[in-house]
Image (cartoon, rainbow, N blue to C red):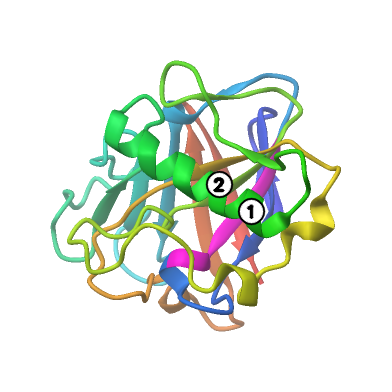
Amino acid sequence: MVTNNCASLTLHKAIINPCGGDSQNEYFGGNTGNSPVNVGDIVIANINPSSGTQPNTNFTWSASGNDTGGNFAETCGAIGLQCNRILDINDPADSVIINSLIDSLNNHAGCGNPLFIAPTGPNLGVIPAYSKVLFFFGGGGNISGTIPPGFDDLNGNFDFSIYCGQGPIYVVFGNHKNSSSTFGFSAIQIPGPIRFRSMEIFPLTLHIVIR
């Protein structure tokens, strides 16, 4: 179920606990609506709804890498709140990583014409209106370098060839501060199990419930 308060972006897929490493292979999928979305305006917040002052955010991804996702009880770097960064296509080092990841996805899909592309333009890039988009927030690896940018056995764990002819699909990447490939999403649940995600596109919020 997706409760959507913003017509510009709707999430309809979340691959949690995937085949292969969580860090590299977990992703969200969605579509933009009738207006473009600036990647730099997006904040992804992973919320634990079962304890603490709400929203009890414990992971975020944003352009700045220091957005608390509405959690006013903690600061980035405090116990329980890890603030991570969305990669910037306009940053030279990030651009190398992003383009390499896009090449890997396209080589895997084998569609001939590129299926996957990165958002370009100011503010970390722009996802055009009426576009498909995937978010790989662990694709950029971790900042300590123990998990390099990339995917875990892309050809063995995915088959994106089924989407040939349905592109372009825009892809947004992030990095994180975990020391291992365990991403942390799987621990955030309440009996059911139900896992909660919140995606903020300033100043509105999408609340995603994954059953």
Q: In the visual, does 73 lie left or right of 15?
A: left
Percent of width and height locating residue 144: 17, 61
Going 55% across and 54% down the picture, which residue do you hit?
Answer: 104
Q: Secondary structure at mark 1?
A: helix
Q: Which residue is mark 2?
A: 103
Q: Which image quarter is the N terminus in?
A: bottom right
Q: Which image quarter is the C terminus in?
A: bottom right
1 and 2 marks in contact (CB < 8 Å): yes
Q: Which residue is mark 1?
A: 107
Separation of residues labelled 1 and 2 (CA atoms): 6 Å
Q: Secondary structure at mark 2?
A: helix
Please determine whether, in this image, residue 199 is positioned above or below residue 124.
below
Which residue occupies the foreground of this view, 158 or 29? 158
Magenta part of the protein: which range? 24-31
Q: Amino acid at mark 2?
A: Asp
Q: Quadrant of residue 30?
A: top right
Q: Is residue 126 visible?
A: yes
Q: Is residue 185 visible?
A: no
User: Please, what is the dominant secondary structure of the magenta stretch?
Assistant: strand
